[in-house]
Image (cartoon, rainbow, N blue to C red):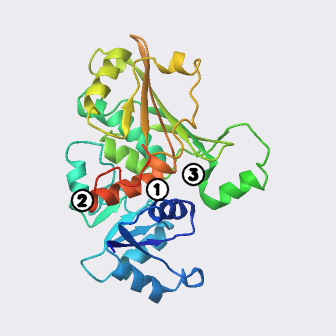
Amino acid sequence: MGYKVFVDGQEGTTGLRIHDYLSKRTDLEILKIDSEKRKDLEERSRLLNDADIAFLCLPDFASRESVSLINNNKTRVIDASTAYRTDKNWVYGLPELNKEQRELIRNSSRVSVPGCHATGFALSLYPLVLQGIVPVDYPIVCNSLTGYSGGGKSLIDTYQNGEFSGKNSPKHYGLKLNHKHLPEMKQVTGITYPPVFTPIVGNYYNGMVTTIPLVSRLLNKKVTAKDIYHIFTEYYADERFIKVLPFDEIIPLENGFLDAEGCINTNRFELYITGNEEQILVMTRFDNLGKGASGAAIQNMNIMLGMEEDTGLNS
């Protein structure tokens, strides 16, 4: 068998999806914990220390606990919680972010998987901040629509069996402007202030769209929507999972509507740029459980193990 892989938190939404990806692989040895022992510290410690790669799909406190149980220099950790996303001792697991990120991931023993909303935000904004187009103190606004699986088992149950069952209207949340993804959104893009961020959950299982509006007159450089399109096309030209759709193609493609479920069950990440000379929309579409969570975790593992990046992933 190949490398040994253990998923700590295998019964959660992200953990189950990672197991689904791994179950189709013949090049890895999957270590499993008995359900009745999933909170047993001794058994978790044994498996964590036996693994070459450990995925942590746990609440923040439990992820920190798992890391503390590792007592060797062999086990490499990929954490899907928010516990380490702004920790300077961990590598942020977004390989497409810049030219250096992929190599940092490849050589790291501790990688933190970005949040789903933060993934769309960072890949939409970072290139524009990096190139000095968007000022670091720009008053950024971001709306992000996601399927209810992003809320884990409790929200899934609320939609499928509970009070939101059969209710189709989208629901805004995070109304105190303190969403848990905000610290990483600010840190990874290098902006001075956190965005005014409005997350929205819809009555569908998975898939998401993030939207960032920009006003040309407030930017450092006079650019149009089409200029922004060309910048993204060049920046992501070599990325196998990122597709920048031809300028304004989404309008005729879907009769002016953007279906948030268009990338589900893939690791694909689509960018749409629309607007005019004065106003610009940067929109992304991807699967909150794919490129926004479990798919991203597998992609990071492939990089860390020196494998083809798309091994076991649907693009």
Q: CA distance from mark 3 to mark 1?
A: 11 Å
Q: CA distance from mark 1 to mark 2?
A: 19 Å
What's under tag 3, amino acid-wise?
Gly
Figure quadrant of the N terminus: bottom left
What's under tag 2, amino acid-wise?
Gly
Task: Check disc 2: other Cα within 10 Å, few if <14, some if 14-19, many if 20+.
Answer: few
Residue 181 visible in the picture: no
Q: CA distance from mark 2 to mark 3?
A: 29 Å
First reached walking from the N terminus: tag 1 or tag 2: 1
Number of marks in the rendered image: 3
Q: Pinpoint residue 214: horizontal percent, then vertical percent.
A: 41, 23
Q: Write the residue at 63% across / 48% down.
A: 148
Q: Write the residue at 48% across / 61% down.
A: 18
What's under tag 1, amino acid-wise?
Ser
CB under 8 Å between discs 2 and 3? no
Q: Write the residue at 67% across / 55% down.
A: 156
Figure quadrant of the C terminus: top left
Q: Secondary structure at mark 2?
A: loop
Instruction: Name the residue carrying label 3.
Output: 150
**238 and 163: which is toward the camera:** 238
Q: Pinpoint residue 221: horizontal percent, then vertical percent.
A: 26, 18
Closest to the camera, between mark 2 and mark 3, is: 2
CB under 8 Å between discs 3 and 1? no
- Looking at the rendering, which quadrant does residue 254 occupy? top right
- Please indicate whether residue 177 sits to the left or right of residue 215 in the image: right
First reached walking from the N terminus: tag 2 or tag 3: 3
Closest to the camera, between mark 1 and mark 2, is: 2
Instruction: Name the residue carrying label 2.
Output: 306
